[in-house]
Amino acid sequence: MNRVGLIATSILVALALLSSMVFVVDQRQFGVLYALGQIKDVITEPGLNFKLPPPFQNVKYIDKRLLTLDSTDTEPMLTAEKQRVVIDWYVRWRITDPSEYIRNVGENENAGAMQLNRVVRNAFQEEINKRTVKELLSLKREALMADVKREVLESVRGAKPWGVDVVDVRITRVDYVEAITESVYRRMEAERKRVANELRSTGAAEGEKIRADADRQREITVANAYRDAQKVKGEGDAQAARIYADAFGKDPQFAQFYRSLDAYKASFNRKGDVMVVDPGSSDFFRAFRGNAAPSAQPSGPRK
């Protein structure tokens, strides 16, 4: 029984020892082999590898993929015309030499990101100080990013190389600081209001002009229509007078009788009219008596 337990214990110890001597390097990582705290080897190819058990040798892993560093600092920068702007940027970078990276930067990706953030920010500050806001927003932005990338590469490849490669540097946003942004928005709003008021004034003036012209055209049209109507009326009255004259000239006695009827109509126009006449001596009602028409125009009634 003791023998079986000893064998099982020996097997477990052997398996534990074997597992501490075997390690697997993923295709997305570098395997850095340490011997008594010193870098002995860097495994760049994925697969199964062997080493001495700790504490003689141990292994650490560093990411070999393309990494992205986004800006987190919102401190404004000064342009060439002393305008305070805030920029957002990102950097695509990767570790190319794990040995140099560990010796000069650190043992993980966070250490490189922190130092790279400082270098990139300083490079942006230096380049933005040389340019105006208009240049930052124009096609010269590409030149700015190219200059920043060049300066960052010079820093990481200097006397103590970092063992990294900077693939790309990009600006995602350029904006004024909040106080200036609010002022710009207020100026834009005031300008839009001024333009709107100017358009309203122009529209009101045009409206008044159109209404005045329409009133003038209306007055002209009414005046012309009245003139034409009076002309037609005058022509009609003249023609009616001519017809009456021709008709009365053919029968003067009938004309006298017709005028007497008109006089009767005018005399009894209202209910309250009162007439005091002498029927025997007056010719006014002679047409009613059935005699011949009066020889003269009947005199008007007294009211």
Image (cartoon, rainbow, N blue to C red):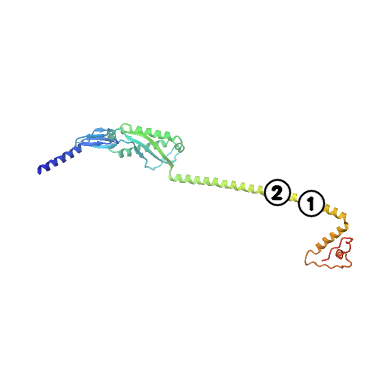
In this view, the residue farthest toward the front is 290
Q: Residues within 10 Å of mark 1 (few under 14, many from 20)?
A: few
Q: Amino acid at mark 1?
A: Gly
Q: Residue at x 10, y 43 (%)?
A: 2
Q: Secondary structure at mark 1?
A: helix
Is residue 252 shown left or right of residue 207?
Answer: right
Q: Classify residue 76 by image quadrant.
A: top left
The residue that disc 2 covers is: 221
Is residue 92 visible in the rendered image? The answer is yes
Is residue 159 shown left or right of residue 276?
Answer: left
Q: Secondary structure at mark 2?
A: helix
Disc with the residue nearer the chain's start (1 vs 2): 2
Mark 1 vs mark 2: in front: 1
Viewer-proximal residue among 152 and 96 = 96
Is residue 133 shown left or right of residue 297?
Answer: left
Whole-angstrom CA distance, mark 1 to mark 2, is 22 Å
Q: Residues within 10 Å of mark 2 (few under 14, many from 20)?
A: few
Q: Which mark is residue 13?
A: none
Viewer-proximal residue among 56 and 83 = 56
Q: Amino acid at mark 2?
A: Thr
From this view, report whether residue 73 is shown above or below residue 264. above
The quadrant of the image that shows the N terminus is top left
Q: Classify residue 174 by image quadrant.
A: top left
Q: Are marks 1 and 2 in contact (CB under 8 Å)?
A: no
From this view, report whether residue 18 is shown above or below residue 244. above
Residue 22 x/y as whole percent: 21, 36
Residue 140 x/y as whole percent: 44, 34
From this view, report whether residue 15 is shown above or below residue 295. above
Residue 252 x/y as whole percent: 88, 57
The residue that disc 1 covers is: 236
Is residue 38 visible in the rendered image? The answer is no
